[in-house]
Structures are given as structure tokens and as C-alpha cells.
Image (cartoon, helix red, strand yellow):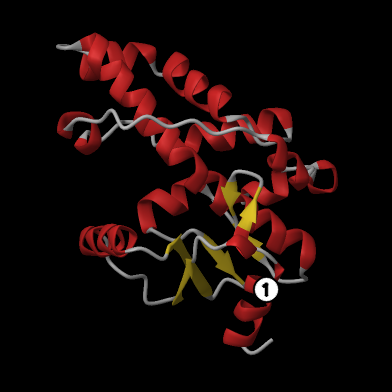
Amino acid sequence: MINLLEQLDLENILLDELKTYDLEFTQIRDNFTENFKFEKPFVSSLCELLLRNNKFPTQKEFRQYYIYNNKEYLKHNFLKTDSRFRIIALISRLNRAYPSLIRDLHFAILLKKKTSLNVFYNDEFDYKQGIDILINDTFALRLFVNTKTSYSNRYKKDYRREYNQKYTYIDVPITMSNDKLFGKFYLYNEDDIDDIKKHINI
């Protein structure tokens, strides 16, 4: 399995660019769209854009890329009825997923750039095994926002997957506080890196 971080020109990825990115959200959602299992996970499109351009895509670039590159699948499987409303609901869901996907990838890159740890990130590893970042081939980091909804979603994902006994799982919740605010994003920072090092005794 390919480590995405080894495919990137990490020295030239400017993490500070995220401070200039805007975010937009709508509260449009419906049960069908929220529960629909898309053939291609959202995170895969984000990774493809990052690999192509060696920079984080904007929210607009991300959602447009996902919809355009999956248009035939969406047309025949997702947009059979109520197509106009459903595409709006999909855009809303993509917009809401974007900050979380950025947060995970940003932290993986930050860990790789700021430490000598063996940091592994792969989008398939993420959505199939529920492991956001793997450290030293041993410690499986699971990243999520410290809210009741996020914990509930985490338990649902755990129920659908089996733990890999090879790894030690570490939950790394992030609090949406001012010290985590980076432009419009809430991101992990070097304090979180220090906490992880302490946790794994490095």
C-alpha cells in the first residue's frame, strides 16, 4: 500500500496557505444523501488533487473535482430521482466533509515535516480500516472532533470494522478552541505532536 506522504514534495507544500482559504456551508441535507454509500470515498478525490498540484485544493476545487470525475456514476446511481435537489444536498455534504479531510491530511504532513517518526497515510487505509495516520508501523491514530456527534460517528464506524490486532489504537480528539483555529479551519498543531510523542514514549 502506497504511502501518500512519500509521493509529495513536502518541502514545497505551504501549510500556511490554508489560512487564506474560505469555507462555505449550507444546512441543506436529506436522509438519502447523508446515508448514501458513494462508490468513491470523498477523501480519494482530495488526495488526487493534492498529489496532482502539491497543494491543498480549495473547498470549491474539491467539490467540483469530485462531482465532475464521478458524474457518470452519480447520474446512474445517485441522481435517478429528485436530481436537482440531490446535487445540492451532495454539494452541502461535500462542503461539510472538506474541513475534516483537510484536518487529517494537514496533521499527517505536519507530523512528517516536524518529526523523525515513520508517518504513514493512505486514503484506502483510512476509509477501509478506520486508521487516519499510522506511526512507526505500530500506533494507529484516529482523529476526530471532540463532540458528541463525532464520538457517535466513531462508534458507528467501529461497529462496522474489525480492529487490526497488529496496531495500538490511539484516539486523538481535537477541541474546537481558539488555539486550534488556523484561518477558517480547526487544525492539529505542534502541541498535539508533543502529546502523541509522550503517549508513545518518544
State the image quarter where residue 20 is shown: top right
Front position in the image: 91 or 78? 91
Residue holding disc 1: 191
Residue located 56% across and 51% down the image: 103
State the image quarter where residue 77 is shown: top left
Residue located 31% across and 62% down the image: 154
Looking at the image, residue 144 lies above or below residue 101: below
Label 1, secondary structure: give it: helix
Residue located 49% across and 70% down the image: 140
Question: Relative to 156, is 122 on the left or the right?
Answer: right
- Where is residue 50 shown, x and y percent of the image? 65, 35
For the residue marked with disc 1, what is the amino acid? Asp
Q: Which residue is the extreme one toward the front?
A: 178
- Where is residue 144 shown, x and y percent of the image? 43, 60
State the count of labels: 1
Residue located 49% across and 58% down the image: 132
Question: Relative to 126, is 191 on the left or the right?
Answer: right
- Where is residue 23 shown, x and y percent of the image? 54, 34
Question: Relative to 139, is 73 on the left or the right?
Answer: left
Please state, as top left, top right, bottom left or bottom right, where the C terminus lies in the image: bottom right
Looking at the image, residue 23 lies above or below residue 12: above
Front position in the image: 41 or 17? 17
